[in-house]
Image (tube, helix red, strand yellow):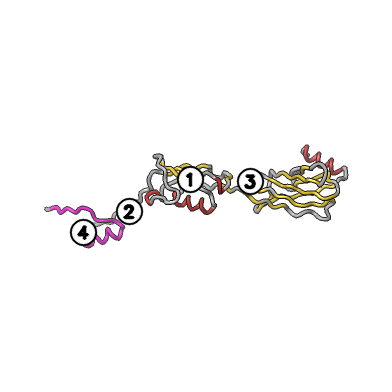
Amino acid sequence: MSAIGALYDAVLALGTNSVDITVQDASGPVAGATVVAVPAAGAPVQAVGPHGGKVAYTLTALAPGAWNVHVSAPGYAATSIALTVPATQPPPPVTLTRTTVAMPDLLGMAVSVALGLLATGNIQVDQILDVTGEALSKTALPADKADAKVLFQFPLPGAQVTAASAKTRLVVSAESEATTTVVPSLVGMNYTQLVKALNTAGLKLGTVKYLSK
């Protein structure tokens, strides 16, 4: 048994009022929360964190009466609930709302796609540079840069950021990757046929030279 668990069991043995507070977000239990109960008069009580397989935070040594339970955790908006001791039934779970979002992994992505993904998450872009140091417009990306690949991003992938105030910076390749096209065989074609074949392949006819035998 851990030291915290032993202390918790010792307090319960005194017969004082205790209440379990479950803290969660949209995806499940929240670890690392701070839960503090404040009475109308007297000293506040801080909850013992989850232990021994429990996911709830346990408030112990609560005097009978009205309490306000304040719950906070990094990356979440703080909240509070009213609690009456002794409780006639367990209080409902406290649901926290995130104030940060995870930075998506943009590495290797076309910068136009990366900007769309950031916009979807309401994450602001502070600066875009190519590898030569040229600054690119954040609102009107040059057409020849739309497919340039993201080589570096800050904050790094997975970092928790505040969307509205994040200073996102991207470094992209200097030029969009060139596309390649297979040149069709033109052997034996007359002029009209080869022009049509090139146009179908997305190619244009350049200089034509006629060689005499």
Q: CA distance from mark 4 to mark 2?
A: 21 Å
Q: Residue at x 27, y 60 (%)?
A: 197
- Residue 95 - label: none
Q: Is residue 175 left or right of residue 162?
A: left
Under tag 3, what secondary structure? Answer: loop
How crowded pointer 2 is (Cα within 10 Å; few <14, some 14-19, many 20+) is rated as: few
Q: Residue at x 88, y 42 (%)?
A: 14
Q: Is residue 12 left or right of residue 119?
A: right
- Residue 188 - label: 4
- The overriding secondary structure of the stretch rendered in magenta is loop
Q: Is residue 49 left or right of residue 107?
A: right
Q: CA distance from mark 4 to mark 1?
A: 47 Å
- Residue 107 - label: 1
Q: Position of residue 154 (x, y in %)?
A: 51, 42
How crowded pointer 4 is (Cα within 10 Å; few <14, some 14-19, many 20+) is rated as: few
Reading the image, the residue beneath label 3 is 75
Under tag 1, what secondary structure? Answer: loop
Question: Which quadrant does the N terminus fall into?
Answer: top right
Q: Is residue 160 left or right of residue 14?
A: left
Q: Nearer the viewer, residue 105 or 42?
A: 42
The amino acid type of the residue labelled 2 equals Thr
Instruction: Say which label, 4 or 1, has the lower sequence index.
Output: 1
- Magenta residues span 187-211
For the residues bearing labels 1 and 2, Cβ distance under 8 angstroms: no
Q: Position of residue 16 (x, y in %)?
A: 86, 45
The amino acid type of the residue labelled 4 equals Gly
For the residues bearing labels 4 and 1, Cβ distance under 8 angstroms: no
Reading the image, the residue beneath label 2 is 181
- Viewer-side label of 2, 3: 3
